[in-house]
Image (tube, rainbow, N blue to C red):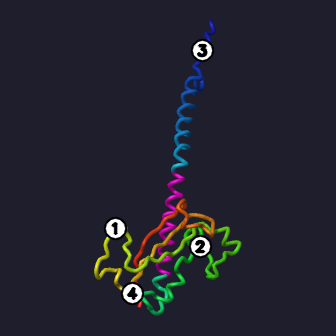
Amino acid sequence: MKNFPSIRRPQGFSLPEVAIATAIAALGIITLLGLLPTGLENVRQAGNTVAIARIYQQMVNEIQSADWGEQSGGIWQNLRKYENARRYFDSEGTTLNRSGNHTLGDEEYLALSYVAKYEFVPLNTALVPGAGIVPGGMNERADARRIIIHVAVTPTPGYDFDDVRSKHEKRAFTITRQY
């Protein structure tokens, strides 16, 4: 009897199959890596938005709950100490420098991520240029003040909010005195 060699089937994958599979996998990985910077930037922006909203809320609450003192010439005497006052915050919008001495310690300086300041809008001034003053509106209420809060994302305690090249957010609020 003759021995016939059995027909062997190839085992494994051929070179073209491996090349195509590698190309498809590489394309998928490159696509995912391309999305990573965009996703990280979105997360950073969302974190900044949340922290800045928290900063606004803390600063508004600080003025609202403060003792405004006596009113003299349309100005609440105890609010003067807040004019252009700076506040410092960490990356989560938590207040640094709780001692109130306007200097940051070494640990606080390293944690500094946001600098904010108050600006009081003069009474009977329209917030929007060219807009009129509404008679009997918030401008004429003795127990209300309009303020602008500036917030900069910066680790620099002496950030210059008045520099025209500075980039920071600012929001206007009308705050009423709590009795």
Q: Nearer the viewer, mark 2 or mark 1?
A: 1
Give the residue type that dot 1 points to.
Gly
Query: 162 or 60, which is in the foreground?
Result: 162
Q: Earlier in the sequence, mark 3 or mark 1?
A: 3
**Image quadrant in which the N terminus is located:** top right
* Residue 75 x/y as whole percent: 45, 87
Q: In screen coordinates, is 163 left or right of 144?
A: right
* Residue 12 x/y as whole percent: 59, 26
Q: Which residue is mark 1?
A: 130
* Picture quadrant where residue 153 is located: bottom right
Q: In screen coordinates, is 130 left or right of 155?
A: left
Q: Secondary structure at mark 3?
A: loop
Query: 43 or 157, which is in the foreground?
Result: 157
Q: CA distance from mark 3 to mark 1?
A: 96 Å
Q: CA distance from mark 4 to mark 2?
A: 28 Å
Give the residue type that dot 4 points to.
Asp
| Mark 4–mark 2 CB contact (< 8 Å) | no
Q: Secondary structure at mark 1?
A: loop
Question: Residue drawn at (54%, 48%), measured in percent from left and top?
Answer: 36
Q: Residue furthest left?
A: 135
Give the residue type that dot 2 points to.
Tyr
Q: CA distance from mark 2 to mark 3?
A: 82 Å
Q: Nearer the viewer, mark 4 or mark 3?
A: 4
Q: Which mark is residue 6?
A: 3
How many numbered discs, if any?
A: 4
Q: Nearer the viewer, mark 4 or mark 2?
A: 4
Q: Which residue is mark 2?
A: 88
Q: Which residue is mark 4?
A: 143
| Mark 4–mark 3 CB contact (< 8 Å) | no
Q: Earlier in the sequence, mark 4 or mark 2?
A: 2
